[in-house]
Amino acid sequence: MTTLTSSSNPPQRRRRPQRRYYGMALLSGLLSISAVALIAYLLWPTWRPAPPEQPIPLPISIGGTLFNIPAKAIREKVQRHSGPQERVDLGFDYPSLKPPGMPRHVSAETVEDAQDAIKRIFLSIAEHHGAMSPETRLQTIYPRYLEPTQSVVADGLTLQAFRDGTPYEQEDLLLAQAQDKQFVARCTRDRETPGTCLVEQRINGADLTFRFPRQWLVHWRDVAAAMDRLTSRLRSTHE
């Protein structure tokens, strides 16, 4: 009988070199990362969000008149919504006519410096409810309270003071002809605080009231043009 015997020392398997194993693992990992990066690049959205400083126009109806108003220009948070409203109060930097940045704290001691540093036009838009128009007030009300004399204060701009003891005392009426329309401003005089000017317009069911520093009257033509541009922007449907 033949018996099979096994060797007490069987042949050992040849071990794979460690260096080759790690090299293959590294190559596999690099290929996986490259594949994921390629897929992420191809699927990454191509849109870009609008710049945060870009004004967002809100369609607001005042007195049945539609305005497209940048949200950042609205001074009162409660008014920052679209739809019908009774009134909105706005502020725009001058001469850029952009909505203002962060508000600055102003004290009684620094009000004059702040007014020089911050050039801003304020605008209120309100439903007039059938009240007297600015044109009618100019023709029928103001003449009752004005001094008879006039003076020229700038190129094409005349001043006529209101009499003391009238509803408009310590104010002046300034008139000029700007292109095909009349420039009319009612301004307070410089006293403890710098004087301010008020310009009124009516568009359908809404009255627009602009306010700006009286010292700007030296360049009243530029101010008048800026107010016209601002009104056109707010009424534009392409904003």
Image (tube, rainbow, N blue to C red):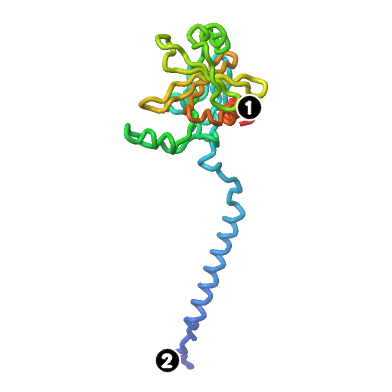
Which residue shows up at 54% across the image and 35% down it? 95
Residue 22 percent across, percent down from the top left: 49, 76
Classify residue 141 as left or right of residue 112: right
In front of the other: label 2 or label 1?
1
Residue 229 percent across, percent down from the top left: 61, 29
Amino acid under disc 1: Thr
| Residue 61 visible (yes or no) | no
According to the picture, the residue beneath numbered tag 2 turns out to be 9
Residue 236 percent across, percent down from the top left: 63, 27
Residue 74 percent across, percent down from the top left: 47, 28
From the viewer's side, name the closer residue of 219 and 228: 219
Q: Are marks 2 and 1 in contact (CB under 8 Å)?
A: no
Could you tell me which secondary element the residue under label 1 belongs to? loop
Which residue shows up at 50% across the image and 32% down it? 92
According to the picture, the residue beneath numbered tag 1 turns out to be 237
Which residue shows up at 66% across the image and 24% down it? 179
Q: How many marks?
A: 2
Q: Residue furthest right?
A: 180
Badge 1 crowding class, 10 Å Cα cut-off, few under 14, some 14 to 19, many 20 or more, is few
